Amino acid sequence: MIDIKYIFIVFIIIIFFIYGLILSEIIDFIFADHDDDTEDYRLALEIIGEIGIAYIIYYSFERYSEMLIFSLFKKISRKVPFYMNQLLLISFSTGIFKHLQKSSNKINYFRKKFLNF
């Protein structure tokens, strides 16, 4: 029989993945599209800004999410697994990079320009 703890972990991972997806859509809405006339240093700053904003928001809410997860695990009388933070960070990162299209286009521009592939 499947333990309720594993179902709960999968549910939380899916929530953090969706959290990353929604945040990536908001960040894509805020930043401009790739423009060939823009200087390279400005494009690099935009990429750093997009990814930086996403992780600043993630880490600012990390303490609150840990408290929520701890309290929910306590209700099912379980201890929070030691690998939970790493799983949530991977899930969030996958959600962020899944739909951060404008940043991906800018990174592809740099890849084609400097690495020639």
Image: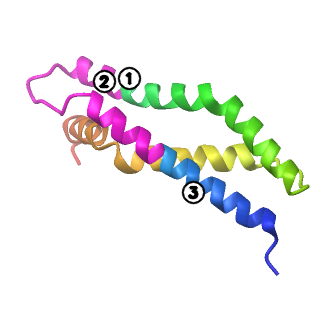
Which residue matches tag 3?
Answer: 14
Which residue matches tag 2?
Answer: 46
Residue at the image position 14 percent from the left and 22 percent from the top: 38
Question: How far apart in space, not on screen, are marks 2 and 1 (Cα)?
Answer: 5 Å
- Residue 96 in percent (x, y) is at 44, 43
Camera-near label (3 vs 2) is 3
- Residue 60 in percent (x, y) is at 60, 25
Left-right relation of 108 to 70: left
Q: Is residue 36 above or below residue 9?
A: above
Q: Bounds of the magenta span?
A: 20-47
- Residue 111 in percent (x, y) is at 27, 40
Q: Residue furthest bottom?
A: 1
Question: How far apart in space, not on screen, are marks 3 and 2 (Cα)?
Answer: 28 Å
Magenta stretch: residue 36 in it?
yes
Question: As shown in the figure, which amino acid type bears the numbered disc 3?
Answer: Ile
Q: Which mark is residue 49?
A: 1
